[in-house]
Amino acid sequence: MPLPDWLGPLAIVPTAFAALMPVVNPFGTALIILGMIGNRPEQVYRSLAAKVATMMLAYVATVILVGQWLLHFFGISLPVMQVGGGLTLAAMGWRTLAGGRTTGAESEHVKDEDAQRILDSAFYPYTFPLTVGPGTMVVLLTLSAHVTHGAPMTTLLSHVAIFIAALLQALLVYLCYRYAPKLAQRLSPSAINAVQQLMAFILLCIGGQIAWGGVSALARQL
């Protein structure tokens, strides 16, 4: 049974969801965040997951509404943003690799301060660029460009469909980040440190790959 005309644009929700999945990657990013944060109380992960999911939706809405205009306003191209975002991720991975082991011998006061520091960093780096970054912006702008045609109502509903797909991704992000400490509870301190170092190296490689994609695009423009 065909969809009514006004519901037709909403049929792109599965396509947008599938396009966002590899760049958001809730499952893989949850492991990276687990490696960065380590063994913390579940309340920290729950609060962080809620903040990241909320900020992710705000980021998506901003990109959909004014993302292209902002890039033009600041004179930034997508390849340059890829280079900058990739280098930022690579630097974060390198800092974690060079930071050494974490220890469990911390006072409660230090732990409380550390937990607050983590929550204060909900946007940077846990939302941007870890959860949503240059790759997400490229996907969103591409999807937006493809649906910005035809009648105004069709264009509006198509953008709503993209946001619904992002909303579903944000729900996955919340669930994956929220329950990441369940994995930490099953790991020994040495295993947590091993995961931390492995994920830091993967983050370094991801950042390098994103930056290389931007450099390659700039080279093709030359």
Image (spheres, rainbow, N blue to C red):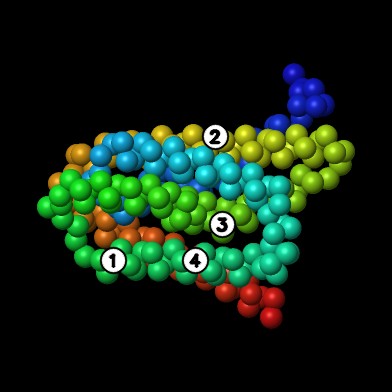
Q: Which mark is residue 168?
A: 2
Mark earlier in primary sequence (3, 1)? 1
- In the displayed structure, would residue 201 be above or below residue 143? below
Q: Position of residue 213 (x, y in %)?
A: 56, 68
Q: Residue furthest right?
A: 151
Residue 158 in sight: yes
Please give the name of the residue rendered at 39% of the width and 42% of the height, measured from the top-left corner. Answer: 48
Disc 3 to disc 2, C-alpha distance: 18 Å
Please give the name of the residue rendered at 63% of the width and 41% of the height, measured from the top-left corner. Answer: 16
Disc 4 to disc 1, C-alpha distance: 17 Å
| Residue position marked by numbered label 1 in the rendering | 97
Disc 4 to disc 2, C-alpha distance: 25 Å
Name the amino acid type tagged 2.
Leu
Disc 3 to disc 1, C-alpha distance: 23 Å
Q: Residues within 10 Å of mark 3 (few under 14, many from 20)?
A: many
Query: Left or right of 76: which side holds 48?
Result: left
Name the amino acid type tagged 3.
Gly
| Residue position marked by numbered label 4 in the rendering | 86
Proximity of marks 4 and 3: CB atoms separated by less than 8 Å: no
Q: Secondary structure at mark 1?
A: helix
Name the amino acid type tagged 4.
Gly
| Residue position marked by numbered label 3 in the rendering | 135
Q: Residues within 10 Å of mark 4 (few under 14, many from 20)?
A: many
Q: Secondary structure at mark 3?
A: helix
Q: Residue furthest top?
A: 1
Mark earlier in primary sequence (4, 1)? 4
Please give the name of the residue rendered at 29% of the width and 59% of the height, measured from the top-left corner. Answer: 198
Query: Left or right of 172: which side holds 180?
Result: left
